[in-house]
Image (cartoon, grey):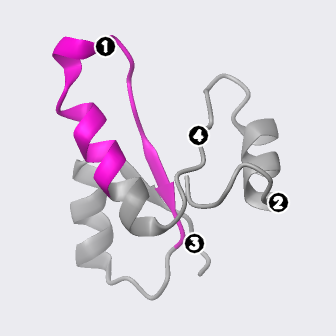
Amino acid sequence: MEGETSSYDSQLYTQIYRDYVVIPCGGCAQVVERTKAFRNSKILHECTVYGLIDRDYRSEHEIASLKKNGIYVIDVA
């Protein structure tokens, strides 16, 4: 998810997604990069990895492309 360990988002998502390990990754680019890397390295782990980023004026096409890589976009910027 976007944000830092001490951010409001991190605290909120930790409460909302209690069945998941929430790992703040900084900015959007880092979330996308890390999510893709972990999803493509299944031989190294048995985790199912998802990314969560802000909408930030993304097109529906871009959102659909991100979703194919396990990266979900919330409805607000």
Q: CA distance from mark 4 to mark 1?
A: 16 Å
Q: Which of disc 4 and disc 3 is earlier in sequence?
A: 4
> For mark 3, does the 10 Å Cα neighbourhood hold few (<14), some (14 to 19), or many (20 or more) residues?
few
- Label 1 belongs to which residue? 45
What label does residue 8 carry, if any? 2
Under tag 2, what secondary structure?
helix
Comparing labels 1 and 3, the label whose residue is closer to the camera: 1
Residue type (three-letter) at the residue carrying disc 1: His
Residue 55 in the figure: left or right of residue 39: right
Q: CA distance from mark 2 to mark 4?
A: 13 Å
Q: Which of disc 2 and disc 3 is earlier in sequence?
A: 2
Q: Find the magenta span and give its range.
A: 33-54
Residue type (three-letter) at the residue carrying disc 3: Asp
Residue 7 in the figure: left or right of residue 72: right
Question: What x and y, as percent, mark residue 38?
Answer: 29, 33
Q: Which of disc 4 and disc 2 is earlier in sequence?
A: 2
| 39 up-or-down from 72: above or below | above
Residue type (three-letter) at the residue carrying disc 2: Tyr
Q: CA distance from mark 3 to mark 4?
A: 20 Å
Under tag 1, what secondary structure?
loop
Pointer 4 and pointer 1: residues touching (CB < 8 Å)? no
Question: Which residue occupies the foreground of this view, 56 or 63?
Answer: 56
- Label 4 belongs to which residue? 23
- Label 3 belongs to which residue? 75
Under tag 4, what secondary structure?
loop
Which quadrant holds residue 41?
A: top left
